[in-house]
Image (spheres, grey):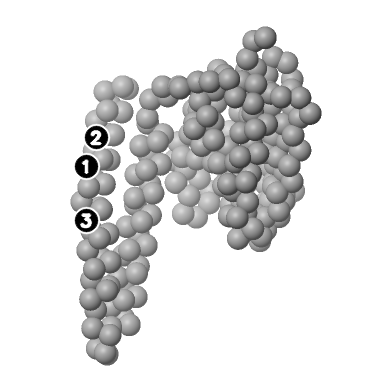
Amino acid sequence: LEELAKLTGGLAHEIKNPLSTIKVNLKLIAEEAPPAHEDSPRWLRKIAVVQKEAERLAQILDDFLRYIGKSELQTNPIDVNELISEMVDFYTPQARTNNVTIRLGLSDTPLVCNIDRDMVKQLMLNLFINAAQAMPSGGELIIRTRMLSPNALVEISDTGIGIDPDKIDKIFDAYYTSKPGGSGLGLSTAQKIAMAHNGSIWVDSQPGRGTSFTVSLPLEAD
């Protein structure tokens, strides 16, 4: 499996190089299209379609490389409350764009865990994005933290469409997605990061009422 990951990772990097060249040249072609030519609007529309698909392919490759990457943790004692606050500040503009209101409820006591800050931020961001995608018409993203010794718990809930019971067991499978345009790697990557920290992640959902993901991370020993 390690050798396979190395080979596929190398292949993905090799694909990204010519893809970058394609994207740059598409931009140049669009800029140099003769504005007065009667076919220019049609050319530009076609170029825009190819540019969009090239960007989507680049995102798929980035998600794949992130997923297969080794979970070599750079850990430090970090207050999960502080990390969540940072992520909420970072994500709030995007939430507003999608008509999503964030409700935040943090534990009164610090929740210090020995974690890799960047990786856990990626985990939380994946769950924020997943929640927003479940609320295409807007809604509420509720984020809470609490202690359940010996773990810190982060609950990320939405008021979205929920998940059908027959799909619950599949949502953490790589490349499984029910969302148009989704990569199918966001939740599987989140689970991989949680497990790399000796933690876990689970889900509770009611179709038509919303979904709640809970992340458990071991608290640092006193």
Distance from the alpha carbon under mark 1 to that under mark 2: 6 Å
Q: Is residue 158 visible?
A: yes
**What is the crowding at mark 1: few (fewer than 14 residues within 10 Å), some, or many (at least 20)?**
few
State which mark lies toward you, 1 or 3.
Answer: 3
Locate the N terminus and report the quarter of the image it occupies.
Answer: top left
**Label 1 amino acid?**
Glu
Residue 143 placement, left or right of 176: right
Relative to 216, residue 84 above or below: below
Residue 139 placement, left or right of 57: right
**Label 3 amino acid?**
Thr
Name the foreground residue: 19 vs 174: 19
Residue 132: percent from left, percent from top: 61, 51
**Label 2 amino acid?**
Gly
What residue sits 64% from the left and 10% below the top? 221
Query: Residue under circle 2?
Result: 10
* Furthest-top residue in this view: 222
Locate the C terminus and report the quarter of the image it occupies.
Answer: top right
Name the foreground residue: 73 vs 3: 73
- Look at the numbered disc 3 and give the secondary structure of its residue: helix
State which mark lies toward you, 3 or 2.
Answer: 3
Query: Residue under circle 1?
Result: 14
Residue 132 placement, left or right of 41: right
Quarter-of-image position of residue 150: top right
Name the foreground residue: 176 vs 46: 46
What residue sits 64% from the left and 36% below the top? 84
Query: Residue under circle 3?
Result: 21
What residue sits 52% from the left and 29% below the top? 117
Do labels 1 and 3 touch, CB within 8 Å? Answer: no
Name the foreground residue: 200 vs 117: 117
Residue 51: percent from left, percent from top: 33, 63
- Look at the numbered disc 1 and give the secondary structure of its residue: helix
